[in-house]
Amino acid sequence: MKKLIIVNGTMGVGKSTVCSSLLEKLHPSVYLDGDWCWNMNPFVVSEENKAMVIGNITYLLKSYLQNSGYEYIIFCWVIHQEVIFKQILEPLKVFDFETYKISLTCSESALKNRLQQDVERGLREPDIVGRSSQRLALYNTMDTLKVDVSTITAEQAAKEICAIIK
């Protein structure tokens, strides 16, 4: 049976890096980062754009679920509210698959350290530190399995996730 692995967490917690590692470990697999569906200039958060992004994500996930060549579908995105899970999963109900919802969590100090390094390398804007820290606690109450990445590498986190889903 196909497995949809949804990895969520606040900005900078390591979702993309962990999922890239999962892609290498799980065969046959495909990986979608929800941020790719928001890659627009200018970046505008509007109801129209939100609906478009959810539509694009569900379209791609449906395509992956229909494709006989993939057993593991890896999807990551911020997903800070349960309603977003519902918006994504509801259109997929017609398919037969197992869902694994996994939140990457970490300490506030670990998060700030990671984000500050990204800011110093020019990968993120300075305001990301406060915005991401504010959302950190939201993931503790979500109906997901938790993987604390405060003191482990992305590779180690991916191994933990593989142990959960196999």
Image (cartoon, grey):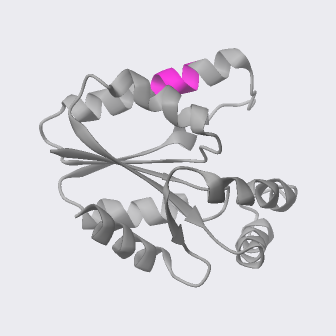
Residue 9 in the image: x percent, y percent?
60, 56
Asked whether 41 falls inside the magenta stretch, the response is no
Q: Is residue 6 left or right of residue 49?
A: left
Q: Nearer the viewer, residue 78 or 95?
A: 95
Image quadrant holding the C terminus, namely: bottom left
Residue 70 in the image: x percent, y percent?
18, 44
* Residue in the picture at 65% in, 21% down: 49
Q: Nearer the viewer, residue 141 or 49?
A: 141
Q: Is residue 130 left or right of residue 54?
A: right
Asked whether 54 falls inside the magenta stretch, the response is yes
Please identify the quarter of the rendering in which residue 61 is found: top left
Please identify the quarter of the rendering in which residue 127 is found: bottom right
Residue at the extreme bottom of the image, as rendered:
151
* Residue in the picture at 64% in, 54% down: 141
Residue 37 in the image: x percent, y percent?
54, 33
Q: Is residue 19 left or right of residue 4?
A: right
Q: Is residue 18 above or below residue 125?
A: below
Please identify the quarter of the rendering in which residue 108 is found: bottom right
Q: Which stretch did the figure color magenta?
A: 52-56
Q: Is residue 33 left or right of residue 128?
A: left
